[in-house]
Image (cartoon, grey):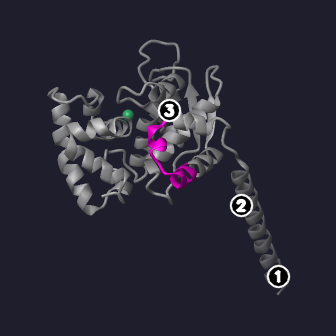
Amino acid sequence: MIKGIIVSLAIAAILLTIFLLWRREQKKLKAYILPGSTKFLLYNYVPYYRNLTAEQKAKFEERMRDFLARTKVTGVSGVIVHDIDRVFIAASAIMLLYAYPKSRYYNLDEILLYPGSFNKYYDTDGPWRNIAGMVGTGVLHRQMILSQQALRAGFLFPDNTHNTAIHEFAHLIDKADGAIDGIPDYLLNKRTKKVWKERMPWYIQAIRQGITDINPYGATNESEFFAVITEYYFKQPEHMKALYPELYGLVHNMYQPNAA
Ligand SMILES: [Zn+2]
């Protein structure tokens, strides 16, 4: 009898502790405030945001706020993280998932900001530094690395199809179903998945033949194709629509499923 009461009390104490910790975490998340320059930066450098209605803009900002409250951004090798970096990172993250109001990046805790490109040994000043971003695996699981220079260039220079942060968030979405294979299960239904799988090789072949203006890196494999084409879609949507209407339609369906 007494043993039963002690066990019950112990369980109640554990549940109460979990609840208090959860409440403290929720309070902390709600208390986070977006940088003061957020609206200015979004209006000037994020066309996607500019095209939203006032109500949608408010929702976009709230999701950015929630993202930044949950995701640590850490400067590495002397990098100082500025508001512009936080805003560009969060804008990239939310653009890709905007049409999915209940989704967030459950597979990410921290973003490491490197000064510039790095090599496969994570050297920021060694030879062969040709990586501008990556989604971590192994010990870097739940982390993303971005070059600060590439992150900013993705937004400050609008006249190309490159955006490193968007590229890496596309990989994270692709990874969420367990495989980085260019087939993002969360953005596809049975029918669109079938079409996407059928059409991807054709476009990769077209890149290899040099008959597109899609970044040749997209021909590396299916996962890079998906990431590269996501950059193109968010950065030059009109251009993509005019040049590759079918491909635009497929990608548009993933990121704006309700618009179709
Ligand atoms: Zn990639």
Ligand 1 lies under 8 Å from the Cβ of mark 2: no
Q: Is residue 49 magenta?
A: yes
The extreme front residue here reads: 54
Q: Amino acid at mark 3?
A: Tyr
Nearer the observer: mark 3 or 1; the answer is 3
Q: Secondary structure at mark 3?
A: helix
Disc 2 vs disc 1: Cβ atoms closer than 8 Å? no
* Image quadrant where one finds the C terminus: bottom left
Q: Amino acid at mark 2?
A: Trp
Q: Amino acid at mark 1?
A: Ile
Q: Is residue 256 magenta?
A: no
Ligand 1 lies under 8 Å from the Cβ of mark 3: no
Count numbered badges in the picture.
Answer: 3
Q: Position of residue 222 (x, y in %)?
A: 27, 40
Whether residue 111 is visible: no
Q: Secondary structure at mark 2?
A: helix
**Residue pointed to by mark 2:** 22
Whether residue 72 is visible: yes
Magenta stretch: dominant SS?
Answer: helix
The extreme bottom residue here reads: 1
Q: Position of residue 206 (x, y in %)?
A: 16, 33
Q: Position of residue 113 (x, y in %)?
A: 57, 28
Crowdedness of circle 2 by 10 Å Cα count: few (<14), some, many (20+)?
few
**Residue pointed to by mark 3:** 45
Disc 3 vs disc 1: Cβ atoms closer than 8 Å? no
Alpha-carbon span between mark 3 and mark 1: 62 Å
Position of residue 22 in the picture relative to residue 121 (left or right): right
Considering only vertical position in the picture, is 42 above or below 210? below
Mark number, residue 5: 1
Q: Which residues are magenta?
A: 46-60
